[in-house]
Image (cartoon, rainbow, N blue to C red):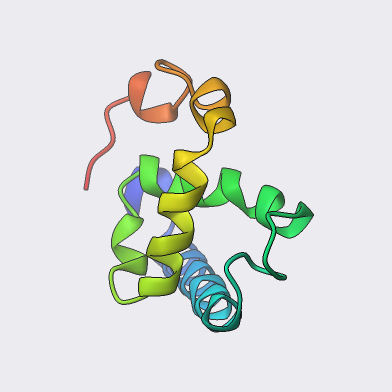
Amino acid sequence: MGRQGFGADKYDDSIERLSMTIDRMEKALDKNQWLCGDYMMLPDICVVPTIDRMADIGLAHLWDNAPNVQRWWAAVKSRPSFDKTYYEGSRVSSRYAIEE
């Protein structure tokens, strides 16, 4: 079995798909401040929960070599709405032990 009850194949496939998403984001952010331009829009808002969950469960290393995604993530986290949405105790890691 893979991590946290998933079969190794499903886990590896999921990680590959998430890595592909990070690659697509990196390319889009190479030309723009946000995913689709100079302003935060619906595509950014839609992907924030996934990226936050990835960071929460120890997958932030997937964007270690993606400086544009790192910049974007820092910009997202600096917004006042971020801390109101992702408040202390709202993440999986605050409820369960997450193994690296």
Residue at 38% over, 18% down: 95
Indicate the position of residue 47 as horizontal and vertical percent values.
63, 54
Residue that sits furthest to the left in the current view: 100
**Residue 93 visible in this rendered orientation of the protein:** yes
**Residue 1 visible in this rendered orientation of the protein:** no
Residue that sits furthest to the front in the current view: 38
Indicate the position of residue 24 as horizontal and vertical percent values.
58, 79
Closer to the camera, 87 or 89? 87
Residue 82 position (above or below residue 69): above
> Across the whole image, how many numbered discs are drawn on residues?
0
Closer to the camera, 34 or 50? 34
Residue 84 position (above or below residue 52): above
| Quadrant in the picture for the N terminus | bottom left
Residue 64 position (above or below residue 83): below
Closer to the camera, 38 or 92? 38
Closer to the camera, 25 or 92? 25
Indicate the position of residue 71 as horizontal and vertical percent values.
41, 62
Residue at 55% over, 75% down: 29
37 left or right, relative to 48: right
Q: Name the quadrant containing residue 40.
A: bottom right
73 left or right, relative to 58: right
52 left or right, relative to 57: right
Residue that sits furthest to the right in the current view: 42
Indicate the position of residue 100 as horizontal and vertical percent values.
21, 48
Residue at 33% over, 56% down: 60
Residue 17 position (above or below residue 95): below
Residue at 70% over, 70% down: 37
40 left or right, relative to 51: right
